[in-house]
């Protein structure tokens, strides 16, 4: 019994030692959490396909993709998803009509439909992070977008122009990377539902890692159109376990459908 007990204790000790590196927070040489890696928006996206499985459905629809009604079905599914999202920007009451009009005519108004940049914060969380001392680079799967975030303590560039992704600076608050962005052009939207903003918008993003999970959260302030700051719904990402994983280059965005839109149908 004593031999069995000592063997059990030894086995538990070995298991604890083996588990410790996985549980410990990965850190860089300067002591900050290591956010580097390729991150997927949903856990299913990084899981291996099951034997015999050739495709993975992440956006379920009730119609065969080859059916001519597939776009109607995508429209329905998208509307259901949007309606189920209770967290919407707190627009001033007098602007509700404008938001609704932009949403109803989004196929004509949404800049993303015409290959314009998504902009911050509509870009959402990055698909890959490259972290170096004093600088973090965010890469996005979509139109080959990237952002460079200095983390060396510098202030905003007073001479920076207004752009789609704005002027960003980063800082560390404990183990959270905080990205402060200003000078964002008012051409972008916050989402596909006519969520416009002014050029006074100010965005603060927060990225924090626990194990192989990354959480992205953002606070949006716009005193011109909002009644209060908007806390966007946090997004959780999963680390791609393949150490050699890289983002594939996106094909160019070519707008060819705009002149042929004749109805208010959209998805």
Image (cartoon, rainbow, N blue to C red):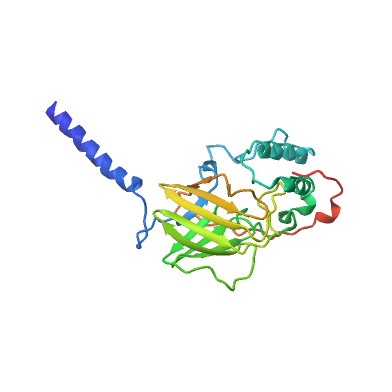
Q: Residue furthest left?
A: 2
Q: Is residue 122 left or right of 23 when viewed as pictured?
A: right
Which corner quadrant holds the N terminus?
Answer: top left
Nearer the observer, 98 or 148: 98
Nearer the observer, 51 or 232: 232
Nearer the observer, 120 or 158: 158
Please determine whether, in this image, residue 174 is positioned above or below residue 158.
above
Query: Residue 153: where, in percent of width, then height?
Result: 44, 67
Q: Is residue 126 left or right of 102 when viewed as pictured?
A: left
Count of labels in the image: 0
Q: Residue at x 75, y 57 (%)?
A: 114
Please determine whether, in this image, residue 97 is positioned above or below residue 180.
above
Query: Residue 225: where, in percent of width, then height?
Result: 68, 52
Residue 244 visible in rendering: no
Query: Residue 190: where, in percent of width, then height?
Result: 65, 52
Please determine whether, in this image, residue 213 is positioned above or below residue 86.
below
Q: Residue furthest top?
A: 1
Which corner quadrant holds the C terminus?
Answer: top right
Q: Residue furthest right?
A: 262
Q: Residue at x 68, y 54 (%)?
A: 189
Q: Is residue 17 left or right of 79 when viewed as pictured?
A: left
Q: Residue furthest bottom?
A: 159
Q: Residue at x 62, y 53 (%)?
A: 122
Residue 56 visible in rendering: yes
Q: Picture quarter containing residue 8?
A: top left
Q: Is residue 1 left or right of 69 when viewed as pictured?
A: left
Query: Residue 21: where, in percent of width, then height?
Result: 32, 48
């Amino acid at each position: 019994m004593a031999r069995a007990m000592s063997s059990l204790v030894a086995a538990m000790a070995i298991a604890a030692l083996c588990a410790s590196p996985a549980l410990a927070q990965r850190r860089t040489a300067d002591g900050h959490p290591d956010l580097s890696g390729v991150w997927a928006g949903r856990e299913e996206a990084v899981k291996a396909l099951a034997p015999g499985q050739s495709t993975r459905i992440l956006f379920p629809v009730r119609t065969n993709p080859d059916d001519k009604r597939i776009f109607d079905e995508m429209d329905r599914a998208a509307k259901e998803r949007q309606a189920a999202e209770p967290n919407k920007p707190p627009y001033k009451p007098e602007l509700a009509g404008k938001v609704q009009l932009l949403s109803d005519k989004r196929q004509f108004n949404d800049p993303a439909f015409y290959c314009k940049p998504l902009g911050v914060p509509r870009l959402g969380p990055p698909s890959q992070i490259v972290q170096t001392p004093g600088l973090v680079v965010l890469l996005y799967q979509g139109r080959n977008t990237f952002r460079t975030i200095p983390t060396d303590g510098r202030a905003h560039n007073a001479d920076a122009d207004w752009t789609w992704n704005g002027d960003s600076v980063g800082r560390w608050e404990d183990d959270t990377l905080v990205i402060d962005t200003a000078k964002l052009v008012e051409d972008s939207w916050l989402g596909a539902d006519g969520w416009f903003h002014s050029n006074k918008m100010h965005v603060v993003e927060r990225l924090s890692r626990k194990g192989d999970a990354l959480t992205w959260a953002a606070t949006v302030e716009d005193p011109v159109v909002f009644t209060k700051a908007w806390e966007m719904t946090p997004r959780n990402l999963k680390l791609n376990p393949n150490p050699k994983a890289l983002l594939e280059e996106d094909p160019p965005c070519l707008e060819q459908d705009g002149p042929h839109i004749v109805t208010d149908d959209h998805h």
